[in-house]
Image (cartoon, coloured by chain):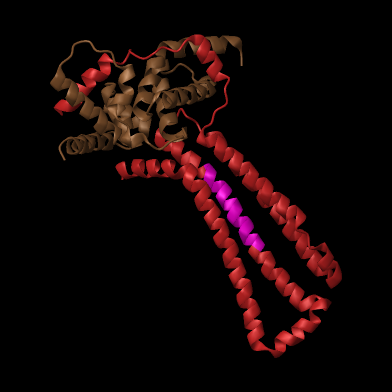
Amino acid sequence: MSENLEQSFVAQLQANQNIIHKICRLYTAGEDAHKDLFQEITIQLWKAYPKFRGDSKFSTWTYRVALNTAITLYRKTKRTISTVDYESHQHFVKDVDYNYEEEEQIKLMYKAVYQLNDIEKALVFMYLEDKDYQEIAITLGISEVNARVKMNRIKGKLKKILNP
Amino acid sequence: MKELDLLKKDWKKNSDSFEQISEKEIYKMIHKKSSSIVKWILIISILEVSFWTITNYYSNIDDMIQKINHPEIILYMQVLMCFNYAVTLVFIYFFYKNYKTISTTVSTKLLMGSILRTRKTVQYYVWYNLGIVVVSCVVSFFIGYVYNPDMEFIRQKLAANGIAMLFSIGAFVLLTLILLGLFWCIYRLLYGTLLRRLYSNYKELKKIDF
């Protein structure tokens, strides 16, 4: 592969790396696993890059490859994902204004989201990223209606986890 | 849902608070080896195909056939060999074709489907080979029994004793079952660990779209 291709890829990825970080944050626990998944996603993106023709935005394309890698290709080394606590992600969080009650609620929400399965996490992730249902449906390969129904069910599930 | 909106707010607030990775580090990363599930499947598949192809190659029963001295059996064996090579080639073609369709740029469901299909191809090949093993055991048992001059003594004994006959057939069936069971266990172990998550995610996706 040519040097130019490599250069343009690295530059674009560097600019869009937060997408990958966010996925790693949702699918891994701890710094090592985060880095590990980040690397695997980067490798998969690079492998798929020659086929990227620019008919969609680099970021849209990154979402898809990164999610596919996290859900399907990545082999977790440890299976402790569902018991992750919010504290292990604290090092990513900067405090701006502190509201105790809100902060508590957010903590509980993160905990609840970690208890979801891989597919549910993907839906929540795209919801948090303001993706519309059409894009969610296309990314996962399900119908738009079913994506909507599933998202509603997930909301119900989260509520149940919060108020058992 | 109020809490989800709260989470979204926090999510957005923190979305650029990650430690940034430099271009230099990304350069390093793209030259590292992937450890994805597809790579493992490819490695295991190649091992399986080589194992069975080598097994086929070495399990020749020429000596026995020479002894029997029936040219029509030699012809059958040659036809079977050719058939076997053809099947192997067809299989390799399908495996390669399925492997090529694995692409991270398609939807999650399609990606999972193509991985599982690729995996299935190899599985079919292994079952086919197990079938061949069983069939050739039966056939050589039969040929040996009927044609092999060394078996004359045993043949007479077995013919005279119905229980011994039943016993030897029973032992043969048992052996076959143990062999099949063993492979089934290996499969469960190997792919249970490798594909458990993929299967459950695939099921989940299919369930949504039902």
At which x and y percent is residue B153? 79, 83
Q: Residue at x 49, y 10 (%)?
A: B23
| Quarter occupied by the C terminus of chain A | top left
- Residue B89 shows in this picture: no
**Looking at this rendering, what residue extends furthest in the bottom direction?**
B160
Q: Name the dominant secondary structure of the magenta segment.
A: helix
Q: Is residue B10 left or right of residue B120?
A: left
Above or below A90: residue B209: below
Identify the chain drawn in brown.
Answer: A
Count of numbered circles in the view: 0
Identify the chain drawn in red.
Answer: B
The verdict on residue B128 being magenta is: yes
Above or below B187: residue B144: below
At which x and y percent is residue A37? 45, 26
At which x and y percent is residue A64? 40, 26
The verdict on residue A163 being magenta is: no
Q: Residue at x 48, y 22 (%)?
A: A39
